[in-house]
Image (cartoon, rainbow, N blue to C red):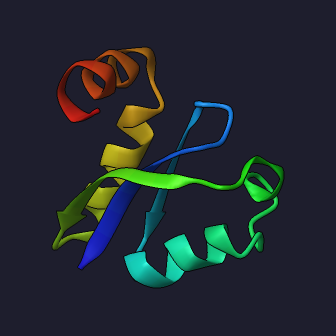
Amino acid sequence: MYYVYILQLRDKTLYIGYSSDLKQRVATHQKGEVSQTRNLRPLKLVHYSAFVSKLKALHFEKYLKTNSGFAFRNKRLI
C-alpha cells in the first residue's frame, strides 16, 4: 500500500507527503528527522488516503498541492 498523508503542524499549517510506510514516516516526522517539519513539532496526522498503486498515490499528492487540490482538501478531507 502507498499513502498520501496530511499533517497539521504546530503553527496550524498543513504538510502533505507520501510514503509506503505511514507509521514509520509519521514517526520520522515526530522525531524531528525531516527538515521541513523539524521546527514545527508537535504535529498531528489529520488525514491519510491509501492507494494500491504508487503512481495513483503520487498523482493524488501532487493534486493536493495545486490550487484545486487545496480547495478539495479543505472542503472534503479536513
Task: Give coordinates of residue 40: x percent, y percent.
Answer: 75, 47
Q: Quadrant of residue 75?
A: top left
Rendered residue at 48%/53% (across/down): 44
User: What is the x, y in percent for residue 37?
Assistant: 72, 53
> In terms of image quadrants, where is residue 19?
bottom left
Q: Which corner quadrant holds the N terminus?
A: bottom left
Does 18 sit above or below residue 59? below
Quadrant where the image shows the C terminus: top left
Query: Which residue shows up at 48% across the image and 32% down it?
Result: 65
Residue 18, horizontal then vertical, whole percent: 45, 62
Q: Using residue 21 as the reference point, say whether residue 24 is left or right of it.
A: right
Q: How many marks?
A: 0
Taking the spot 32% from the left edge, 21% from the top edge, the residue there is 74
- Residue depicted at x 38% and y 34%: 64
Q: Is residue 10 above or below residue 43?
A: above
Residue 56 location, x and y as percent? 25, 57
Name the one closer to the observer, 28 or 66.
Answer: 28
With 26 as the anchor, is 62 left or right in this view? left
